[in-house]
Amino acid sequence: MTKLEQLIKELCPNGVEYVPLKAIAQIGTGSSDRINANEDGEYPFYVRSKTVLRSNIYLFDEESIVIPGEGGIGEIFHYVNGKYDLHQRAYRIHFISDKVNTKYGYYYLAEHFKKFIMMKAVSATVTSIRKPMIENFLLPLPPLTIQREIVLILDNFTELTAELTAELTAELTARKKQYEYYRDKLLTFGDEVPRVALGDVCVKTRNITWKDTDGEYYYIDLTSVDRETNEIRPEQIINAHNAPSRAQQIIQTNDVLFATTRPTLQRYCFVPEQYDGQICSTGYCILRANPEMIMPKFLYYTISTKNFGIYVENNQKGASYPAITDSRVKKYRFPLPSLKEQARIVEVLDRFDKLCNDISEGLPAEIEARRKQYEYYRDKLLTFKEAGA
């Protein structure tokens, strides 16, 4: 029997009382807006996101729990102890009862509040909450000794999970830097290799004529390409009746897409077979390799290099929403070795890429496993029999 189990057996063998928050806590919003945010502010400024801003003023000096009133309902919880500023659509829960450990309340809300809110919802999502909804949330109140033991266990588990995540992330970052170094090294040549423009090794693409088709297509817009994995994940299926005005370009297997809007974000991808014949936004430059001159994958690796990134940065236009034209992208000049040498380089880089991707897939999987393990134990620790039930 664990220490916690022993405490529960001794101190509350018949269950615990469940109390509405309104009976044991002050609940309300702040009065500040994001205009109050100051990057160098002295105090934490809690808004409606996981990101904590800074402010030069504070509205409260206390121990409390902060949750958003809009967006991220049931997903975002902040434990606060000290002076802080608070957004006008974020709620503070400050316990006024000496029967509650605030950190215990924080962990309990993180585990159970979303399920409570969803039971009150009339749709599949909850976009905002009001004070009465929070006030009626029931908090089980075991003796403080038990609350403190739960907090100690969960604090330790949280710290261990954070350390593991940091280690795995550092490993992934190191591997990616190693990969980028060798990629750029392999794609650097001397004067013996001729330099060509992207436009010289690409063939023409074509746009769709919507009036001539009644088909449905995946639409690849600027949010459909993951910047970390360079994979396509379209969320929208379009046809002649609902196609956005920018949905014009027909893509093919082995095309290389490069986003020309905010191009220094380096949003690019290699088109796999399942998206052959689908539609992408005119916000992409389609680079379709002439197979007699360049391997499509070599073209893909070429635009992933540091040199191409520098070229894009120097040739984009516009301050608030920079972009680069397709024609300017295709003027980028790079060394083009023989097809045989291209094949050798692509083989090497594919192996490196697979190594990084394997780690990338393994990292989220490991983190997800730890998260589920943590949530399992948190749920187990924070489940109590109700007294009299």
Image: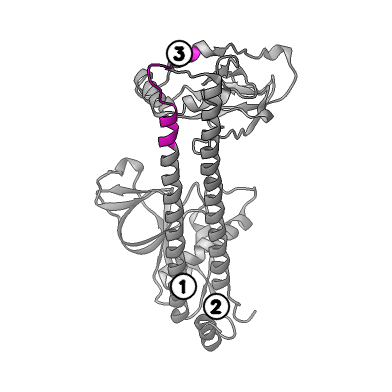
Residue under label 3: 196
Tag 1 secondary structure: helix
* Residue 374 visible in the shown view: yes
> Looking at this view, is 122 or 125 the one in front?
125
Q: Which residues are magenta?
A: 180-199
The residue located at (41%, 27%) in the rendering is 264
Judge by depth and name the residue closer to the eye, 151 or 177.
177
Write down the residue under mark 1.
153
Name the disc covering residue 107, or none.
Answer: none
Residue 225 placement (x, y as % from top left)? 54, 32
- The answer to the question of whether label 2 and label 1 lie on touching residues, with beta carbons closer than 8 A, is no
Compute the Cα span from label 1 to label 3: 62 Å
> Which residue occupies the extreme right position in the image?
214
Mark 3 neighbour density, 10 Å: few (under 14) some (14–19) many (20 or more): some
Count of numbered marks: 3
Residue found 58% across the figure and 18% down from its top? 245
Of mark 2 and mark 1, the one earlier in the sequence is: 2
Where does the image place residue 125, in percent across and percent down from the top left?
60, 48
In the picture, which quadrant includes the N terminus? bottom right
Which residue corresponds to the image point at 53% horizontal and 13% vertical from the top-left?
201
Dot 2 corresponds to which residue?
17
As measured in the structure, the alpha-carbon distance from the residue carrying label 3 to the one carrying label 2 is 76 Å
Residues 140 and 194: in front is 194
